[in-house]
């Protein structure tokens, strides 16, 4: 091995070690940086328009762009969060006050459902202490809600800090983003065409996934809240917001909310309301997801709906909330690599 080879190997070992160390140092800020990149990719046309109106004053344009986003995005999200927390406390108080009544409903009316079950199942269910199980189930759900609210309060300072980092990063992404992208292309050993294709896929998939998810969530949340309001269910706005949040999970998101409500209505003997909500959930809320997701996400990203489902669920499992967007992005980049491989090597 020549001296030049030893120097090259040594340099790349040091290079890799420093890169790994740098990533390790900033790893806690990966989420706000990722969101800042997403927001910059979405709103960069707005920033460019403001720059033109201000005769090229980039710093002022970046500040005004962030201010507009804060007013029209963060403030509405904060209001939604306040409504969600308020109704959560209402539901928690209601649950604590009426646990005994709910247990009575279960104990008294469960026999109405037993005839639907096979004899073997009925015999097994007869030995279960339904009162204790019902109390434990209700307490588990309400305690979970209360614990999450406590954690949200405790982590408020951390959330504010992450938002500050995101906005601070966004300022420089507006101002210096294109130059950073060009530098990244220059440093990368890949062909310029491949790099630009990856960047294009990243932006296209991120936009389609985020906009599609928000649109689907809004539609399903409104439809769900409307149904709960018509049926007189407590806190319809809260449940609409929950459906909106859970609709990020394709196919099964809203299902998680309205199916338990149907079961409760059946136990209470409200068969008409239960049947209405079941049909409404399947053919209105459910079809909204099945119709809108392929149109808003699949058609723009050119990703099969099955792959969208798997990548979204896998992304959530690995990356948490960020995986909603990151999962489909990774899937799109994977398909892009396969396409480049097919064109060049097959």
Image (cartoon, rainbow, N blue to C red):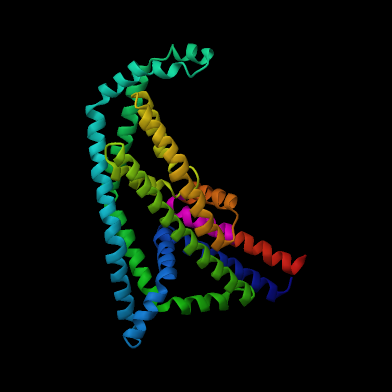
Determine which quarter of the picture holds residue 240: top left
Q: Can residue 97 be found in the magenta stretch? A: no
Lateral position of residue 42 relative to residue 310, left or right: left
Image quarter of the C terminus: bottom right
Lateral position of residue 212 relative to residue 261, left or right: right
Image position, residue 319 (x, y; %): 47, 51
Q: Residue at x 68, y 67 (%)?
A: 340
> Is residue 249 at least partly visible in the picture?
no
Q: Can residue 329 be found in the magenta stretch? A: yes
Q: Residue at x 26, y 45 (%)?
A: 85
Viewer-side residue, 222 vs 332: 222
Image position, residue 232 (x, y; %): 28, 36
Image position, residue 78 (x, y; %): 27, 56
Q: From which residue to which does the magenta span run?
A: 320-332
User: Residue placed farthest to the right in the image?
Assistant: 346
> Is residue 229 at least partly visible in the picture?
yes
Image quarter of the N terminus: bottom right
User: Residue placed farthest to the bottom in the image?
Assistant: 55
Judge whether 309 appears above or below 95 on screen: below
Q: Residue at x 65, y 73 (%)?
A: 8
Judge whether 318 appears above or below 233 on screen: below
Count all numbered tags in the image, as a single digit. 0
Viewer-side residue, 169 vs 252: 252
Q: Residue at x 55, y 70 (%)?
A: 200
Viewer-side residue, 66 vs 191: 66
Determine which quarter of the picture holds residue 267: top left
């Amino acid at each position: 091995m020549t001296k030049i080879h030893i120097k090259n190997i040594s340099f790349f070992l040091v290079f890799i070690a420093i890169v790994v160390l740098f990533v390790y140092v900033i790893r806690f800020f990966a989420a706000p940086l990722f969101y800042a990149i997403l927001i910059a990719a979405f709103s960069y046309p707005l920033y460019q328009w403001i720059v033109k109106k201000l005769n090229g004053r980039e710093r002022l344009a970046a500040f005004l762009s962030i201010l507009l986003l804060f007013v029209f995005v963060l403030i509405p999200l904060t209001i939604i969060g306040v409504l969600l927390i308020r109704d959560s406390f209402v539901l928690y108080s209601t649950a604590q006050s009426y646990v005994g009544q709910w247990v009575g409903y279960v104990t008294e009316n469960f026999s109405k459902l037993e005839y639907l079950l096979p004899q073997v199942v009925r015999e097994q269910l007869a030995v279960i202490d339904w009162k204790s199980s019902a109390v434990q189930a209700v307490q588990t759900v309400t305690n979970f809600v209360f614990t999450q609210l406590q954690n949200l309060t405790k982590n408020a300072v951390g959330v504010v800090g992450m938002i500050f980092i995101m906005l601070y990063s966004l300022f420089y992404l507006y101002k210096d983003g294109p130059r950073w992208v060009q530098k990244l292309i220059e440093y990368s050993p890949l062909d310029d065409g491949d790099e630009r294709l990856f960047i294009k896929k990243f932006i296209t998939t991120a936009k389609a996934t985020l906009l599609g998810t928000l649109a689907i969530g809004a539609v399903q949340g409104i439809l769900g809240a409307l149904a709960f309001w018509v049926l007189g269910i407590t806190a319809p706005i809260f449940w609409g917001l929950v459906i909106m949040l859970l609709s990020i999970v394709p196919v099964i998101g809203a299902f998680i909310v309205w199916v338990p409500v149907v079961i409760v209505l059946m136990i209470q003997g409200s068969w008409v309301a239960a049947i209405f909500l079941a049909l409404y959930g399947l053919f209105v809320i459910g079809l909204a997801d099945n119709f809108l997701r392929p149109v808003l996400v699949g058609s723009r990203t050119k990703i099969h709906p099955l792959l969208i489902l798997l990548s979204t669920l896998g992304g959530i499992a690995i990356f948490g909330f960020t995986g909603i967007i990151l999962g489909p992005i990774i899937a799109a980049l994977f398909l892009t690599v396969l396409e480049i491989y097919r064109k060049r090597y097959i």
